[in-house]
Amino acid sequence: MSTLDQAFIKAYGQSAESAKTTASKSATSPTAGHAVVPKPHAHFDVAEANRRAMAMTESPAAPVKLFEPEGRALRAAFEVERFEWPLVCARLFTAAGRELRQFTDVLTEQIQRGRKMLAVTGCRRGDGRTTVAMCLAQQLAERGLSVALVDADFRHPQLAEQLGVVPSAGWDDVLQSDLALNEAMIDSTQDRLTLVPLRNPQFDSGVTLENPRFGVPLRALRESYDAVLLDCEPLAGPEATDYLATLVGRGGLDAALLIHDLHQTTTEAYERAAHLLNQAPLAAWDIIENFVP
């Protein structure tokens, strides 16, 4: 592990620990629980979208529609002025801004080499996957890249909640209905990036992975954005092999970042996750060792 990685990792571990206290305090603050309902982009036909939504239950699911209207470049149907970033993101940048920028520089070079879709995953829940994904998305957007931040944690989707928005649809709805992909996308005008949320937990993620249309939205995002960051499920449990294989084979995943919590993750869990990544046909994968003492 490089000196850069160690500096970045320590700062993240310290900021994440301090954020636990901040998070408990913010739950009683005047703004706690306040979430923004995204408004339609000016180009989006709300009446037509409502008509299609009413018809969803009356007609069988059609192939994934990427845009509405068809033929238009992929563009989010909804927008907010800005996302409500968790305090831990700001704390991380305060503690290790230089290291984080250098870390993102390396990632930017990889993206320019065609490795556009990155999974941020882990060995277990609670290891900081979502926070790392959000921070990297911020940094890439600040470099002028077009960024799609995708919730791919089917059992426990939380990106929309973490960023303070209430989506009317998620890309899980796109897979299960005639909804166009851009109707499950939310632009932040100030942050200059796009959120692609999941709206409902999928307690049997295998059903989602087996959907024959699963890879279409991800590949469309990969073609339309400079960088696509997936906030993924941890690589744990018997379904992890199929989960990763589907993201790579059908979703077009290029690379992965494994978050390893040194305090809580067993050696067996770490070795299993690392083995799965080694076996997957990825262009690259790397490790962030979190909560370094």
Image (cartoon, rainbow, N blue to C red):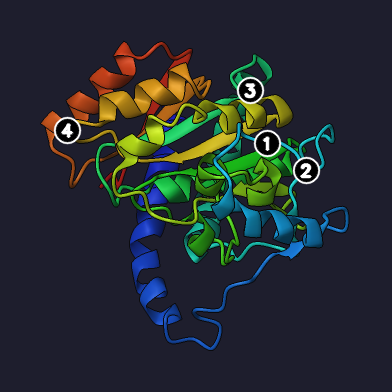
Measure the C-alpha gap from mark 4 to mark 2: 43 Å
Is residue 65 something that shows in the picture?
A: yes
Labels 4 & 1 near each other (Cβ < 8 A): no
Q: Point out residue 253 in the picture as x, y percentages from the top left corner.
A: 50, 23
Measure the C-alpha gap from mark 1 to mark 3: 26 Å
Image position of 191 (left or right of 26): right
Question: Where does label 1 land, which residue?
Answer: 65
Q: Point out residue 244 in the picture as x, y percentages from the top left corner.
A: 36, 25
Q: Amino acid at mark 2?
A: Glu
Residue at figure coordinates x 55%, y 41% from the top left? 60
Question: Where does label 2 land, which residue?
Answer: 68
Can you tell which of label 2 and label 3 is closer to the viewer? 2
Residue at figure coordinates x 27%, y 30% from the top left? 240
Q: In terms of depth relative to the viewer, which is nearer, 72 or 8? A: 72
Measure the C-alpha gap from mark 1 to mark 2: 7 Å
**Label 4 Cα neighbours within 10 Å, binned few <14 / some 14-19 / many ≥20:** some
Can you tell which of label 4 and label 1 is closer to the viewer? 1
Residue at figure coordinates x 51%, y 65% from the top left? 87
**Label 3 Cα neighbours within 10 Å, binned few <14 / some 14-19 / many ≥20:** some
Circle 3: element type: helix
Q: In terms of depth relative to the viewer, which is nearer, 206 or 30? A: 206
Measure the C-alpha gap from mark 4 to mark 1: 38 Å
Q: Point out residue 135 in the picture as x, y percentages from the top left corner.
A: 54, 48
Q: Decide which of tag 2 and tag 3 comes sooner along the chain.
A: 2
In the rendered image of this protein, does residue 130 appear above or below residue 35?
Answer: above
In the rendered image of this protein, does residue 191 appear above or below residue 75?
Answer: below
Question: Where does label 4 land, which residue?
Answer: 269
Q: Decide which of tag 4 and tag 1 comes sooner along the chain.
A: 1
Q: In terms of depth relative to the viewer, which is nearer, 17 or 7? A: 17
Image position of 124 (left or right of 213): left
Residue at figure coordinates x 50%, y 43% from the top left? 176
Question: Where does label 3 land, which residue?
Answer: 111
